[in-house]
Amino acid sequence: MHLKALKRILFAAMLVGLSACGGGGPPANPIPTASGKIDLSKEALVYFKVNKDYGSGKLGFIKFYIQKEGTSQIRDYICGKDNRIPIAERLAPGRYVFVLMSGNIIATPVEPVPVVTYDPSKGIPLTPIDVKAGDVLYLGNVLVSGIGKKTAIGRADSVVYTVEDHSDLAKKSVAEYYPELASRLQTRLIKVLP
């Protein structure tokens, strides 16, 4: 993705409403049973969370976007609340790349969204999310420090990423909302790239 195209993401912040933690598209978190049963022959159930890290255990709101690699399909999330409970998300099979992290919760990409191909030397230094139909995954809790109210669309010297393993909380959520899937949950933590 070209730097100019990435910068355009930052200037459309007030054009689109905010979405709650759990994604820009249905279903919300936790996935309500009223929205229908998950179809693991066509999708994956993925648990993860991203928070701004203020230090001393205090967490804050952050907005982030993942994009399905090779497409303009993008999903936005706002995670806040001072807790580490992961969100649940349904994802179609494919590879998803973190394309934007922002301490400014009104940051929004412009249309049309540029198509990305993952480049570990330029993008946000987190491994992509690879999912296939039938996956039930916990990917970790990503903590972002040093971002303040800025927006990162690639590598930023002042921004530090850490991944915590709270698979116990993901297991508890799967057991509560999807007891039939509890034995299928696998932990595959996102990694921070050098």
Image (cartoon, helix red, strand yellow):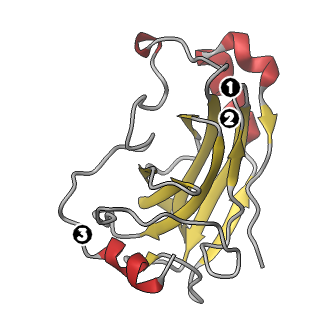
Q: Amino acid at mark 1?
A: Lys
**N-terminal of the two: label 2 or label 3?**
3
Instruction: Please give the label number shown on residue 12.
Output: 3
Instruction: Please give the label number shown on residue 172.
Output: 1
The reply to whether residue 129 is in sight is yes
**N-terminal of the two: label 3 or label 1?**
3
* Residues at marks 2 and 1, CA–CA distance in whole angstroms: 5 Å
Which residue is nearer to you in this view: 189 or 65?
A: 65
Instruction: Please give the label number shown on residue 30.
Output: none
Q: Nearer the viewer, mark 2 or mark 3?
A: 3
- Badges 2 and 1: C-beta atoms under 8 Å apart? yes
Which residue is nearer to you in this view: 41 or 139?
A: 41
**Image spot of residue 86 (x, y percent):** 59, 41
Label 1, residues with CA under 10 Å away: few <14, some 14-19, many ≥20: some
**Image spot of residue 136 (x, y percent):** 72, 29
Disc 3, SS: loop
Label 2, residues with CA under 10 Å away: few <14, some 14-19, many ≥20: some
